[in-house]
Amino acid sequence: MNGKVYVVGNFKGGVGKTKTVTMLAYEAATYLKERILVIDMDPQGNATRVLAKTGNLDNISKSITDGFRNGNLTDEIVHVMDNLDMIPANTSFRNLSKILFDKYPDNEIAQISYLKELIEPFKNSYDRIYIDVPPTISDYSDNAMIAADYCIIVLQTQELSLDGAQTYIAYMQFLSENYNAHLQVVGIIPMMLRQGGRVDTRVLDQAREMYGSNVIDTIVNYQERLKVYDVEGVHMNTNANGKVEMWDGKAHQIFIDVLNELNDHEAYLENI
């Protein structure tokens, strides 16, 4: 096994990156039965909170901050549920730049390659590693992009999100050219705020014109159930007959479709 690493991004905040990370991780763990690791690199720790609720974890003492300081992320892995682990974040990770500078004061390449070095020992233990990062050009995004094999871009159907996606792709290309990053866009996921809205439709059309088949066909429409998962954790309830509750089924199916389509894109990229 040689797990693939995915960074999920956009340089605009609030577009659904964390939701995408947690849902894809959950579907890959439950639907594909793969071994999944989520690395939370956002000091706000939103992915950590969602996954803690998903796994009914009341107290998390481990953190990516300690792993970066100690040079060992393996000790910071927290088990969430069958096939799904995470490396949690907390607010102390806001000091990432200082941690990196203290370790490598005169070596920029070592600073931005540190995550890649730290996750190497356990890549053979996981099929997929998803990284959640803040929406900024920073040491967080640099480390995630250098460590990743593939980039998944979340595109909310509004102008600023498209601008953020364009900047993200341009910055990814800059890292590839200047720092030997081996990173490809495996897919752009459209998140539509208002189905049939004029702005939403126009932005989606613009994205497809600019990026062609990189924009996946599956559109993640606004669903109240997906917001519930932010509060209660990701779950799949069943009714008295043992069948998946309808709204849970719809919410999960959309991300299973996204996962399948991204897998198709990845298989194509591996074979060209």
Image (cartoon, rainbow, N blue to C red):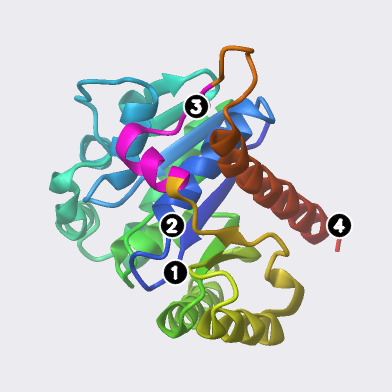
Q: Which residue is mark 2?
A: 17
What's the amino acid at mark 4? Asn
User: Along the polypeptide, which appears first: circle 3 or circle 2?
Assistant: 2
User: Along the polypeptide, which appears first: circle 2 or circle 4?
Assistant: 2
Query: Residue sitting at 40 percent across and 21 percent down?
Result: 79
Horizontally, residue 96 falls left or right of residue 258, namely: left
The image position of residue 10, as x and y in percent, is 44, 69
Q: Which residue is mark 4?
A: 271
Q: Nearer the viewer, mark 3 or mark 2?
A: 2
Are the two marked residues, 1 and 2, in contact with CB atoms closer than 8 angstroms?
Answer: yes
User: Along the polypeptide, which appears first: circle 3 or circle 1?
Assistant: 1
Q: Which residue is mark 1?
A: 10
Query: Residue sitting at 57 percent across and 26 percent down?
Result: 125
Q: Secondary structure at mark 4?
A: loop
Are the two marked residues, 3 and 2, in contact with CB atoms closer than 8 angstroms?
Answer: no
Mark seen at residue 84: 3
What's the amino acid at mark 1? Asn
Magenta-drawn segment:
225-237
Q: Is residue 126 above or below residue 41?
A: above
Q: Secondary structure at mark 1?
A: loop
In the depicted view, which residue is nearer to us: 147 or 107? Answer: 147
Q: Is residue 88 above or below residue 7?
A: above
